[in-house]
Amino acid sequence: MPITLQVENLKKSFGNLEVLKKVSFNLEKGKTMVVIGPSGSGKSTLLRCINQLTPPDSGSVVLDGIELTNNKTDLNEARSEIGFVFQNFNLITHLNVLGNVSFGPLRVKGKSKKDSNDIAMEELKKVGLEDKAFSYPAELSGGQQQRVSIARALALNPKLILFDEPTSALDPELIGEVLDVIIKLAKEGMTSLIVTHEMGFARSIADEAIFLENGIILEKGPPKDLFSNPKNKRTMDFLQKISQLYGEE
């Protein structure tokens, strides 16, 4: 299986705080990888370093053969191949749903307004929100806003989508509608890297899982191994605490 994403020896510090410490992994095309770990372990920083919203101090990120960390790379063009779904939606409040989703094809990919709107409507259908095309973000529930965010990411026809705890800002009853969309995308073969605190979801969707703590990958492997039979004691302790907290098996 071809490798879509290669991350090698990624390091990032903020002042004296070393957030990522030589993080390395590969993600195959069409696969889903989940990243779990306690708060402050570097999970969100990892995603932001991958698409260069936060430039790493050292190490390399290669997307489909193009090194994003090479200063000769056209970063805007390379970044247009990566969709990013944030915790807090990040929708443009003065644009309606159609305008938010068509923004990428229109402004980033340089497509015509008609083509951009056609792409946007197609992606809104995928997330079940074509009837909300002319609504504004403030008129939507949190779950609907996050589904619009996913449609916006898909509209770029990306090679990779990064999800940064996509349900953390949602009321509990709205989480399912977002997770259902992500599960559907994974089944359709969208290459995805997902930071999540939803352990049941992570176990069910992942082809591979990473446990990150203090900027170090302590354990990596198939979810059936990492979640059911972790080799690292710290991974085991973390999963037990999460299970006790949320009552997950």
Image (cartoon, rainbow, N blue to C red):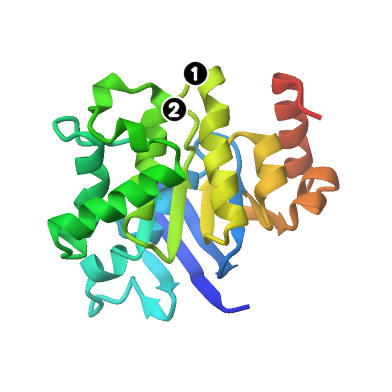
Label 1–label 2 contact, CB within 8 A: yes
- Quadrant, the N terminus: bottom right
Q: Is residue 241 visible?
A: yes
Element type at marker 2? helix
Circle 2 is placed at which residue position?
143
Q: Which mark is residue 6?
A: none
Give the x, y percent position of residue 174: 51, 23
Q: Nearer the viewer, residue 119 or 61?
A: 119
User: Mark 1 belongs to which amino acid?
Assistant: Asp
Please tell me how crowded label 2 is: few (under 14), some (14-19), or many (20+) other residues with Cα within 10 Å.
many
- Quadrant, the C terminus: top right
Q: Residue furthest right?
A: 229
Circle 1 is placed at which residue position?
171
Say which residue appears at 58% left-offset and 38% top-offset: 180
Element type at marker 1? loop
User: Mark 2 belongs to which amino acid?
Assistant: Gly
Say which residue appears at 78% left-offset and 44% top-offset: 227
Say which residue appears at 40% left-offset and 56% top-offset: 12
